[in-house]
């Protein structure tokens, strides 16, 4: 099984917004998404990163236009899903499965590009999203206009999947492909229903921990940013609990990758930006 991450876009943020005790200087953050080449399931995407649906889509709502303008993601052409798939001899039609770790725009923006994909996501979080008004969902950071209209009929919810128990500091969770190779691990705090992906068969067990923190440094040095990150978090107090569990996983020999950390990891596609 092969796992790679691509960078769909760059966004900038003042360090103090993403690292407690940080400075005012701007940090350029990646917006990763992943591609798994799984021996049985075939090519599987982990989220989609930012795509033009957020930055230039002609039918965007006023709120989505505002979001795009404020965050100002700088799309990376060579890191967009089409370009990355082409490097593997694939087209969007070849993608049969997309793992949707949570419903924020930088994770779901490109879902409409993949007409043949089914979506693995938290069905519990989807039910809660459906029960809210569009305005309430915005407060949870979810732009419902970005979902394909038939999202629900293509949803394979985590709740129906076999659970693998944790082993010491190696977390457990839903066994996505029934072979123990990719396990969905609950990561409460950042967003409703957010889960990460544990790849226990790597030389060092790998946990893609999505958006638990923006920076690896904030995890390792226990520097969760306070205000205003607190306002944006689904459950701010859970972030430190989840981060503590990730530090135990690191101490047990695991490797953690976040979506936005600027550092290049061995799993990132190169050249730079790709
Ligand atoms: Zn997020």
Image (spheres, rainbow, N blue to C red):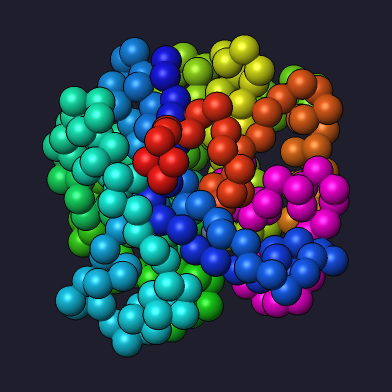
* Residue shown at the point (25%, 77%) measured from the top left: 60
Is 227 one of the magenta-colored residues? yes
Q: Can you say whether 18 is above or below 47 in the image?
A: below
For residue 179, say whether it is visible.
yes
Judge by depth and name the residue closer to the eye, 260 or 109.
Answer: 260
> For this view, does 265 lie left or right of residue 132?
right
Q: Quadrant of the C terminus?
A: top left
Which residue is depicted at the point 42% across and 19% down? 2
Is residue 89 shown left or right of residue 73?
left
Please say whether residue 120 is visible from this viewpoint. no
Drawn side of residue 219 relative to residue 69, left or right: right
Residue 57 relative to residue 251: left or right? left
Residue 182 lies, in percent from the top left, at: 50, 25
Residue range (magenta): 209-236
Residue at horizontal 49 percent and vertical 39 percent from the top = 159
How far from the left and from the top, in percent, is residue 32? 46, 46
Compared with 259, 64 (above or below) is: below
Point out the image quarter for the N terminus. top left
Provide the major secondary structure of the magenta segment: loop
- State the residue in front, 10 or 3: 10
How many marks the image carries: the answer is: 0
Image position, residue 48 (x, y; %)? 36, 48
**Which residue is pictured at 62% across the width and 32% down the height?**
207
């Amino acid at each position: 099984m092969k796992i790679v991450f691509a960078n769909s876009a760059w966004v900038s943020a003042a360090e103090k917004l993403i690292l407690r005790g940080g400075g005012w200087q701007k940090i350029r953050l990646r917006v990763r998404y992943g591609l798994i080449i799984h021996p049985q399931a075939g090519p599987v995407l982990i989220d989609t990163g930012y795509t033009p649906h957020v930055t230039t889509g002609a039918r965007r709502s006023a709120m989505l236009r505002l979001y795009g303008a404020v965050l100002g993601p700088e799309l990376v052409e060579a890191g967009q899903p089409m370009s990355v798939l082409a490097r593997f001899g694939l087209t969007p039609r070849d993608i049969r499965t997309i793992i949707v770790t949570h419903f924020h725009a930088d994770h779901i923006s490109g879902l409409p590009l993949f007409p043949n994909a089914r979506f693995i996501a938290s069905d519990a979080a989807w039910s809660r999203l459906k029960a809210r008004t569009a305005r309430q969902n915005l407060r949870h950071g979810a732009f419902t206009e970005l979902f394909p209209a038939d999202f629900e009929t293509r949803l394979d919810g985590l709740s129906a999947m076999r659970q693998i128990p944790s082993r010491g500091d190696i977390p457990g969770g839903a066994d996505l492909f029934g072979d123990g190779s990719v396990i969905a691990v609950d990561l409460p705090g950042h967003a409703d229903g957010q889960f990460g992906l544990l790849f226990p068969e790597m030389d060092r067990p790998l946990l893609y921990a999505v958006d638990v923190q923006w920076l690896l440094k904030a995890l390792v040095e226990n520097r969760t940013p306070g205000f205003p990150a607190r306002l944006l978090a689904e459950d701010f107090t859970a972030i430190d609990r989840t981060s503590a569990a990730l530090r135990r996983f690191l101490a047990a020999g695991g490797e953690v990758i976040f979506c936005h950390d600027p550092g290049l990891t061995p799993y990132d596609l190169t050249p730079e930006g790709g």
